[in-house]
């Protein structure tokens, strides 16, 4: 639960007293703390929200579009998703890249010392928060797949895992085990990564999220933009993703 966002919305509608009461209820419900400790935490959250949003300026602020991620279909491969990615490409302006965000491909490509360096990254499926091994397995497979389909040979994998304040530490190890299962099967090492709490003290609960990236090298590449009439397309039946793994 995002305590900061929850408090920020309540403060504008019901005031400090009611916000404090509701925060105490939620904290006790999720954390299992006594009322005194929950009250102290709630007050700290409110103080932090007030401090953070009282010092905003034109550099720190962002334009409020009033369009929500879910409503616009970002991450759902719909029209809104492609529109957002096209705007990302306009901002990034990666002119020196061979394949960049402007190409809307699954991996990016740069050239170095006569070789193509292919990089991809995939996020953990949101429905796999309670299944860390499967989450690690599938996201690694997805990142590595994107390198392979660009015509490259994967040479390294990296990871980033975020777990909320109440998440069990063992999720990290199961997640890494899932990643390394794919790495061992393909002979591609996991070489680096990062572990963080989601939102620090401001997000409570057990939610897990993150991503896995893959780096590959190639002498030639097969980008999506090179597809032409008469090409043969090879399709495979899905072997299961996040949704299938949890149903």
Image (tube, helix red, strand yellow):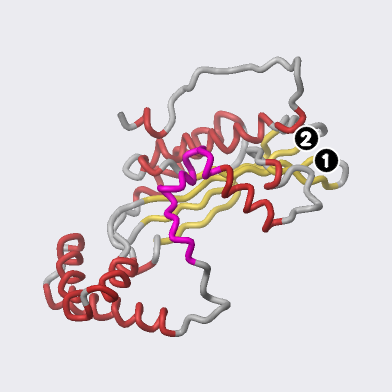
Mark positioned earlier in the residue sequence (1 or 2): 1
Is 44 part of what is drawn in magenta? no
Q: How many marks?
A: 2
Is 70 part of what is drawn in magenta? yes
Kindly report the distance in space between the C-alpha atoms of the residues bearing marks 1 and 2. 6 Å
Q: What SS does tag 2 mark?
A: strand
Q: Which residue is mark 1?
A: 115
Q: What is the magenta range?
A: 64-81
Residue 90: horizontal and vertical position, in percent?
69, 54
State which quadrant residue 214 falls in. Answer: top right
Instruction: Report the magenta stretch's main SS.
Output: loop
Label 2: few (<14), some (14–19) or many (≥20) C-alpha neighbours in 10 Å: many
Tell me what residue is drawn at x 15 percent, y 67 percent. Answer: 25
Relative depth, front residue between 107 and 201: 107
Q: Which residue is mark 2?
A: 218
Label 1: few (<14), some (14–19) or many (≥20) C-alpha neighbours in 10 Å: few
Tell me what residue is drawn at x 67 percent, y 36 percent. Answer: 154
Q: What SS does tag 1 mark?
A: strand
Residue 136: horizontal and vertical position, in percent?
45, 40
């Amino acid at each position: 639960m995002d305590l900061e966002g929850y408090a920020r919305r309540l403060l504008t509608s019901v005031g400090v007293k009611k916000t404090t009461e509701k925060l105490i209820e939620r904290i006790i419900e999720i954390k299992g703390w006594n009322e005194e400790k929950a009250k102290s935490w709630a007050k700290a959250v409110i103080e932090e929200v007030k401090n953070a949003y009282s010092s905003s300026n034109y550099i720190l602020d962002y334009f409020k579009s009033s369009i929500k991620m879910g409503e616009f279909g970002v991450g759902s491969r719909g029209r809104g998703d492609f529109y957002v990615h096209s705007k990302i490409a306009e901002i990034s302006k990666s002119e020196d890249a061979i394949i960049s965000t402007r190409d809307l491909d699954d991996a990016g490509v740069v050239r170095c010392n006569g070789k193509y360096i292919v990089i991809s990254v995939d996020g953990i499926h949101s429905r796999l928060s309670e299944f860390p091994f499967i989450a690690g397995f599938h996201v690694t497979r997805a990142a590595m797949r994107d390198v392979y389909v660009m015509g490259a040979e994967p040479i390294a994998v990296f990871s980033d895992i975020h777990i909320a304040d109440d998440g069990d530490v063992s999720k990290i190890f199961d997640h890494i085990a899932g990643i390394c299962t794919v790495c061992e099967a393909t002979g591609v090492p996991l070489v680096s990564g990062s572990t963080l709490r989601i939102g620090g003290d401001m997000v409570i609960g057990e939610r897990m999220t993150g991503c896995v990236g893959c780096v590959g090298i190639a002498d030639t590449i097969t980008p999506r933009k090179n597809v032409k009439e008469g090409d043969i397309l090879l399709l495979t039946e899905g072997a299961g993703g996040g949704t299938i793994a949890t149903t």
